[in-house]
Image (tube, rainbow, N blue to C red):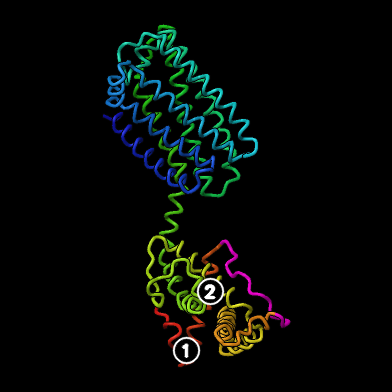
């Protein structure tokens, strides 16, 4: 019962990790690191699922070849180990990785061919989902089969332990946790190799080990594979948790940006990638608030560029007035920019459209993109202050009330 529960839990975790990484692969199908992560999770899932006794027996019966599932199970474990090595190769030295990758693939192919040849040569006529090693380890062919399997796995686990411990020293906190989980999983994998090797050696010498090989092997695999899968998706889980925590803040920022966006949208409607049916109303956003916030900042930046240069004299005068009224430095700067935006909008909408002439005046430089920082929320905070100041300015002018809807918090 415990073995079955371990198989089911591990399979569910492995499939969940596979689906997460598959989504990442769809977004970036050319990234070899993501490809390796998908192979790791898929290999873990296959190894656990086919190793479960009901599935193992069903495959044997469907193919008519007793214990053929053992090759699929052990081969999947080797693919997982090789894929983790490939992942670290591309993390460490992407330029050198393809050459070193070929060496790993040649070794993996040679071992798999050896295992298949020894399996075909051995007499394993009775299907044994759990006690394969106990029943057939004394056969020389199976001894060679297991020797090649364990040596290849030991080399891979040694690389994984060495590289995960090395990278954990230099990684930031969250990545360091993932690396340590991977190292712990590899440690259980090393325990599996040592246990299996010792058991096979005793059986070949005609000694019956005093413990149950299936229980120990399955326990070590059940501990190793989930840790490997969790280490790969932990960063995605953290990003999702961060997005959920930031959701209320980002939604507030999105609503605060609407008055500024709407004013620019009326002046230059082409800034909207997907124009809303009712642009005067800020549409609600849910889990995609981060993407909507980024898109809104980009559209505002495009609108500001379309306005042309902002008059530094207007900015300075409005900033001094705001500072004299007791505004903080950031709010005073936002008030200056908001006043200059209103002047630029009036200039854009005027029949003369003095933009070209103003471009030639000294002190009026072309307007650059205002979304330059990788921290989108920092840009959104600054633009939200400008939006708030714009609402205040429009509220003072009764003739401009219809231009931008009053901001509702």
**Residue 44 at what x, y percent from top left?**
41, 33
For the question of whether residue 204 can be seen, the reply is: yes
Of 295 and 279, which appears nearest the observer?
A: 279
Residue 383, disc: 2
Residue located 45% across and 84% down the image: 403
The residue labelled by disc 1 is 400
Residue located 59% across and 28% down the image: 102
Badge 2 marks a residue whose secondary structure is helix
The reply to whether callout 2 and callout 1 are in contact (CB within 8 Å) is no
**Residue 180 at what x, y percent from top left?**
51, 40
Region in magenta: 360-374
Query: What main secondary structure does the magenta stretch of the protein show?
Result: loop
Residue located 44% across and 24% down the image: 75
Badge 1 marks a residue whose secondary structure is helix
Q: Residue furthest bottom?
A: 398
Q: Quadrant of the N terminus?
A: top left
**Residue 187 at what x, y percent from top left?**
48, 31
Label 2 vs 1, first from the N-terminus = 2
Reply yes or no: does residue 362 show up in magenta: yes
- Name which quarter of the figure residue 351 lies in: bottom right
């Amino acid at each position: 019962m415990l073995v079955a529960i371990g198989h089911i839990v591990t399979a569910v975790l492995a499939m969940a990790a596979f689906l997460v990484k598959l989504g990442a692969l769809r977004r970036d199908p050319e990234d070899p690191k993501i490809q390796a992560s998908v192979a790791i999770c898929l290999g873990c899932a296959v190894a656990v699922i086919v190793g479960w006794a009901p599935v193992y027996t069903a495959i044997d019966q469907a193919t008519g070849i007793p214990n053929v599932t053992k090759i699929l199970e052990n081969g999947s474990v080797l693919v997982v180990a090789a894929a983790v090595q490939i992942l670290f190769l591309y993390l460490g030295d992407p330029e050198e990785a393809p050459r070193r990758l070929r060496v790993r693939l040649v070794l993996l192919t040679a071992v798999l061919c050896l295992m298949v040849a020894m399996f075909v040569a051995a007499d394993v006529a009775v299907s044994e989902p759990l006690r394969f090693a106990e029943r057939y380890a004394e056969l020389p062919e199976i001894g060679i089969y297991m020797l090649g399997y364990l040596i290849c796995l030991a080399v891979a686990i040694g690389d994984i332990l060495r590289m995960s411990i090395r990278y954990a020293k230099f990684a930031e906190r969250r990545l360091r946790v993932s690396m340590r989980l991977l190292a712990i999983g590899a440690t259980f994998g090393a325990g599996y190799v040592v246990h299996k090797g010792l058991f096979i050696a005793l059986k070949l010498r005609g000694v019956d080990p005093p413990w149950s090989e299936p229980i120990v092997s399955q326990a070590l695999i059940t501990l190793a594979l989930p840790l490997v899968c969790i280490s790969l998706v932990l960063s995605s889980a953290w990003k999702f948790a961060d997005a959920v925590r930031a959701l209320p803040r980002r939604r507030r920022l999105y609503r605060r940006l609407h008055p500024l966006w709407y004013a620019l949208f009326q002046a230059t409607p082409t800034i909207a990638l997907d124009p809303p049916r009712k642009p005067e109303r800020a549409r609600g956003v849910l889990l995609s608030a981060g993407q909507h916030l980024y898109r809104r900042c980009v559209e505002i930046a495009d609108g500001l560029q379309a306005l042309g240069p902002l008059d530094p004299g207007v900015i300075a005068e409005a900033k001094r007035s705001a500072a004299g009224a007791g505004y903080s430095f950031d709010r005073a700067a936002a008030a200056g920019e908001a006043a200059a935006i209103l002047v630029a909008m009036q200039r854009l909408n005027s029949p003369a459209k003095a933009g070209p002439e103003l471009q030639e005046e000294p002190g009026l430089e072309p307007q650059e993109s205002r979304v330059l920082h990788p921290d989108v929320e920092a840009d959104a905070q600054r633009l939200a202050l400008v939006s708030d100041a714009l609402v205040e300015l429009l509220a003072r002018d009764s003739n401009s009330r219809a231009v931008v809807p009053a901001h509702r918090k």
